[in-house]
Image (cartoon, grey):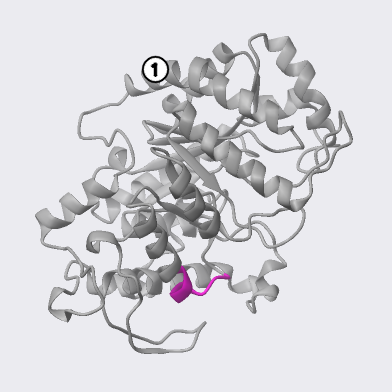
Amino acid sequence: MQFGIFSVSDVTTDPTTGHTPDDTERVRSMLTIAKHADEAGLDVFATGEHHNPPFVASSPTTMLGYLAGVTKNITLSTATTLITTNDPVRLAEEYAMLQVVTDGRMDLMMGRGNTGPVYPWFGQDIRQGVPLAIENYALLRRLWTEDVVDWKGKFRTPLQGFTSTPRPLDGVPPFVWHGSIRTPEIAEQAAYYGDGFLHNSIFWPMSHTKQMIAFYRQRFEHYGHGRADQAIVGLGGQVFVRKNSQDAVNEFRPFFDVAPVYGHGPSMEDFTRETPLTVGSPQQVIDRYGAFVEEVGYYQRQMFLIDHAGLPLKTVLEQIDILAQDVVPELRRIVEAKRPADDVPLNPPTHAERVAAAKAAGELGAAHVGGTEDRWTGLRAEESDPQHLEPTAGRAFGL
């Protein structure tokens, strides 16, 4: 299993000092956090995408492209790439470029975001959120897997003889996750294409997470990508850890109580009971997260939110060290021991694994802008048509 951290890039006042970082300080802190996570041996760093205060991560590919040059091993990803309000042509170009720059050490997570006003800011209608996600992603896949695209849809101008450049690295597109908290149509989309599904359950009880993951797994098998337990699953989480549990509670409480994301709502005790937020000792985090596999089955990626709510940079770096040294090794041992079979993926697929699989299946795309004789041949015809999705399937699961 992979373990990593993600940032929503919030700019929040530190309630213990009154200090509010400016945008530049916050961006540079995120870069420091990602580099430290790489040095500490964590597997993944992911950044969100937001276009409004109090968030600063408006350009994920810029940040991740820089990090590609200053990190060595960590997978660089997004916690959300807005599939609804970004032009899929631009997404195809930017993330293929990032794939080349990182030499395949990246993936991305598609999502609709959590900020309603972003839709009109980018000329879209929030009431069309799910149809936008379906149509835009269908076009994005074609741009990555077909050298020359003729296309006509509802939400953007048609394309005639268009080739997206650069072509995906080694002719194989980046691995894609679809992220959703409560929308079964997005889980359906992930299952339809055989992509990964990440349920960022930081504000939801395990009962809901379990239901969404079970639905995705069932639909993954329905579409013929493998058994349900072979689907690629990720979870979001939140932790604040100190060697002594009471020290963790005392230190984190002032941040929890006033943070805009959950301040002035449920108590910290209520929130930790009802959501994955865990404030305590390393063993408490190990015990709690080690049990999640019993609820959702073996899964491939666990992400932690640790740099939010105004926590100072020094504290965040200390959290990374505690995770890397005292939590992840034991948690990895516990969870991987529960993998039900050798043919259940241990981790999400690497770029090299995807290239090998495409070669074996004779499905490599062209790695250059010419040579249409090398066009991708493995895309099923119906995959370019989003109408073949079954967005109402979740109703049978009460979703």
169 to the left or right of 258: left
Q: Quadrant of the N terminus?
A: top left
- Asked if residue 366 can be seen in this view, the reply is yes
Q: Magenta region: which residues?
A: 85-91
Query: Residue drawn 10% across and 54% down?
Result: 360
Vertical relation: 171 (above or below) 288: below
Q: Secondary structure at mark 1?
A: helix
**Residue 86 lies within the magenta run:** yes
Where, by quadrant of the figure, is residue 244 drawn? top right
Q: At which x and y percent is residue 7?
A: 61, 43
What is the x, y in percent for residue 51?
68, 62
Residue nearest the observer in this picture, 170 or 275: 170
Residue displayed at 43% across by 48% down: 197
Asked which quadrant contains residue 393, the reply is bottom left
Left or right for 364, reference 290: left
* Position of 164 relative to 62 (above/below): below
Rendering coords of residue 109 (x, y %): 47, 53
Residue at 66% of width from left, 56% of height from top?
114
Q: Residue furthest right?
A: 18
Answer yes or no: is residue 201 visible: no
Q: Is residue 339 magenta?
A: no
Name the residue carrying label 1.
334
Residue 157 x, y percent position in the rendering: 48, 88
Nearer to the camera, 276 or 36: 36
Residue type at numbered disc 1: Ile
- Residues packed near mark 1 inside 10 Å, few (<14), some (14 to 19) or many (20 plus): some
Q: How many marks?
A: 1
| Quarter occupied by residue 165 | bottom left
